[in-house]
Amino acid sequence: MTASHSDSLVVLFGATAGAYGAKLGSDERELILLVWQVVDLHSKKVGTLHKSLVKADNLDLSEQCREVSGLTPEGLGKAEPLDRVLQQFSQLVSSDLKVLGRSSYTLCSDGQLLIRQVLHPETSKKNFLLSDCFYSFYDLRKEFHTCYPSSAAVKDQTIKTMAEYLGLGTDETEEDFGVWQVKTMVAIIFSMLSEDHAFTEPETVKYKYETGPCSKSETVDSETVIRARGLPWQSSDQDIARFFKGLNIAKGGVALCLNSQGRRNGEALVRFVNSEQRDLALERHKHHMGSRYIEVYKATGEEFLKIAGGTSNEVAQFLSKENQVIIRMRGLPFTATQEDVLGFLGPECPVTGGKEGLLFVKYPDGRPTGDAFVLFSCEEYAQNALKKHKEILGKRYIELFRSTAAEVQQVLNRYMSTPLIPTLPTPIIPVIPPAYTIATGSIRDCVRLRGLPYTAGIDDILEFMGDATGDIKPHGVHMVLNQQGRPSGDAFIQMKSADKAFMVAQKCHKKMMKDRYVEVFQCSGEEMNFVLMGGTLNRSGLSPPPCKLPCLSPPAYAAFQTAAVIPAEAAALYQPQALLPTTRTPQASAAAPPTVTYYPAQAAQLYMNYTAYYPSPPVSPTTVGYLAAPPGAVAAAATATHTPILPQPGALVRMQGLPYNTGMKEILSFFQGYQLQAESILMLYNFSGQPSGEALVTFPSLDLAKKAVAERNGQLLGSRCVQLYLV
């Protein structure tokens, strides 16, 4: 029995099979020794001193453990396992209290580590519960410093230094390991009691993690936040709290991080109640969650708020119901209503507050995203809901996952900040800054990297090249994508000189990047452009391109005789006619060898935020500026090119809900009879280069676009119901 103002202390000391002292528990080694004794704070009497060995699953003792404790694997092999030892502990403490005529007690240990870093994590992993007495304890080092302010700082205290400060005997060899420590701690406590010290404010360990919202207006101390990396993707906030069992996480302090597709990326930011708890969390670096080790690093309060903070009143109201289990639903039909979702979940998993326990995620213009969050009052209801994972609602299967308050904020923040495609302004003329020129001469000052891992990015390439990165020309790294807009495994790099290119090719050829070796060839700008147009280059020389389709990133480019390379995404939005061309005479074209000019990829981003592209060059070029063109300028541009400019607003239709294998042919068939051509269709992709299930279709007239929406909206394409919107 414990109480906040106990009449007894149970002085507790322990050791593991690994590190000792300040590193106790940092290596995940199991407990092998417990020593304890009851102290009556009023009569200053003591109970029997008990020493119990603990049989660990792994009896391989570290050198430090063998040297300090004198224990052997043979001796530990005859001991009881931890759960039995803890049962004996409770029985013997109760018996000693009865002899002393006392009823309540609180544990007292030498510092935080035994309770927080050893007992709680180990029992959590072995799936048995600690008794209530282990959730409240006195830290003898803190109590000693409170009683004797002139003593050493808490972090520098040990049993020996406290004993020396009081002039007590410090010869550890007089007693068995553990026995001397407990006897000395008892003597220290008696000295403190003689100074009228009162044990009134014990340390506490939280029983469970508390969920809750976080506002962006909150102040989060950077000394309380860590980043955990390497988490299983299906980990919930409760799983992370269990990994940090024994440490006090702040309310709503677990924020799972999402990638650009809204899926968990294996990282989380965790906020603790104070810096002391954060420092203990850092000691769990590379501890295991199941079979995976988790990396733990320092993070900042700004990073935490960026992930977990929110400003939406709707979200705040939704999350105001505390201690709820949150489930995320993904893949809902866009027409799904609250009644549909409640009917899908059924009576076996009632939603907290009925409709008030549902939160649909929407774009800024009110369109549904297909995501929703649901609140359940208990674990049983949530488990029943999770059993419906991949069951059908309407014509779509629904995915269900555990979620967190921070994930709700993060998903809502992501979608609400998404730029809208359906808000094309008046016709505009792009003001393009000076272009980046890819040289086309015969000087072999370039290198080609072939066989890159498909997950490799610019940073991986720069790390691969090592010291040679300083010899790369500004804006000189170019990723190469295939015709599907995905990484081809190739990249070209422009070096400052042919000598530098030669040295890189010699030094880096067949060097490993991740789990693949990469081939590096020296080449010229001319050869580089030749390959970008579809040819092949290796140490045997050049092979001609099979076609004239360029494949430099972004995924698709339009090839012009003027050799200007314009992102096709931008051209598709504004139509090639809306881009004011550079006039060139045939004589000028013949006089100078053509160069390939690169215009920054931001042009592809203005209204095409769903289109994947790889930045080339790697450094961010100057942002492309766009100016609204006055009517006269637009008319002049149209007259000069003798072609119409952008179709009138409203003649553009957006398709949502397409099967992911949909191509031009299927869309043309869907709109049969509406006078469309393949050039009228623009497929949209997400940030990973995968089809997003959306497309933009340009109709010859506004009336025809309205007719198509009226007649074809909600019709099936394959097995999916397609939604149409006028842009």
Image (spheres, rainbow, N blue to C red):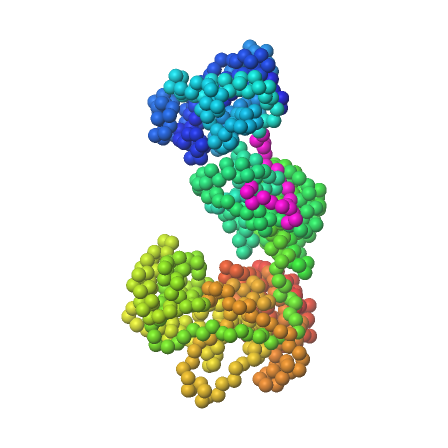
Q: From the viewer's side, name the closer residue of 719 and 370.
A: 370
Give the residue furthest to the left.
540
x, y (%) of residue 3? 62, 22
Magenta stretch?
Answer: 204-224
- Whether 209 is drawn above or below 486: the answer is above
Q: Is residue 19 magenta?
A: no
Q: Is residue 337 left or right of residue 248?
A: right
- The answer, for residue 446, to whether it is visible in the render is yes
Residue drawn at (39%, 62%) of the image: 469
x, y (%) of residue 674? 62, 74
- Whether 206 is drawn above or below 688: the answer is above
x, y (%) of residue 400? 58, 47
Residue drawn at (51%, 27%) of the image: 151
Q: Is residue 211 magenta?
A: yes
Q: From the viewer's side, name the closer residue of 581 and 670.
A: 581
Give the residue furthest to the front.
150
How many labels sit on residues? 0
